[in-house]
Amino acid sequence: MNGNIVYRQCAVEEVAPLMVDAVKEGLTFIDGVIYFGAFDGDKIVACSGLKITGNKVFFKSSFVTPEYRGIGIYKAMVSISYSFIVTLGCKKIAAYCTKMSYPMFQKLGFSVVKQY
């Protein structure tokens, strides 16, 4: 970990190295998602996806590798994703949460609509 995390929009191919571990934790990846990644040098260490349907946006498929958890990367990813959503003018935002991501969205004022 070099501490110089760079955040940017990225292609699904760049997210691919995270998918095996993310799926083990119960995440799913679907087509048509815009991804943002956190990179430590050339290595992708986190991703967050947005699925846009009309004027509604869903946070989807967010994952931080275990060795990079607890240092604010996920919070930064949500902030960057939210800034992008604002530029789109979307009126409704929802999040598919895991037990780890739910507290962050709760702090942001999200409420539970449906539990699975």
Image (tube, rainbow, N blue to C red):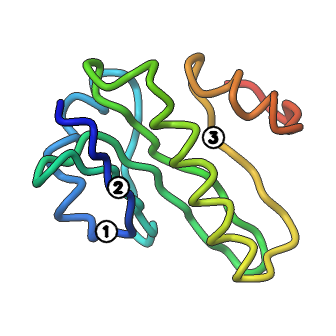
Up-down relation of residue 3 to residue 7 (above or below): above
Q: For residue 11, what is the image quadrant?
A: bottom left
Looking at numbered disc 2 in the image, what kind of residue is underneath it? Gly
Quadrant, the C terminus: top right
Tag in front: 1 or 3: 1
Residue that label 1 marks: 10
Q: Is residue 73 left or right of residue 11?
A: right
Tag in front: 3 or 2: 2
Question: Can you give x and y, in whole percent of width and height, for residue 6 in the image?
Answer: 32, 55
Q: For residue 87, what is the image quadrant?
A: bottom right
- Mark toward the start of the polypeptide (3 vs 2): 2
Residue that label 2 marks: 37
Q: Is residue 13 left or right of residue 99?
A: left
- The residue at 18%/30% (across/down) is 1
Q: Are marks 1 and 2 in contact (CB under 8 Å)?
A: yes
Residue sitting at the far front: 3
Q: For residue 22, what is the image quadrant?
A: top left
Question: Can you give x and y, in whole percent of width and height, for residue 109 in the image?
Answer: 89, 37
Residue that label 3 marks: 96
Q: Secondary structure at mark 1?
A: strand
Question: Is disc 1 surrounded by few (<14), some (14 to 19) or many (20+) residues within 10 Å?
Answer: some
- Mark toward the start of the polypeptide (1 vs 3): 1
Looking at numbered disc 3 in the image, what kind of residue is underneath it? Tyr
Question: Is disc 3 surrounded by few (<14), some (14 to 19) or many (20+) residues within 10 Å?
Answer: some
Label 1, label 2: how many angstroms apart (C-alpha)?
6 Å
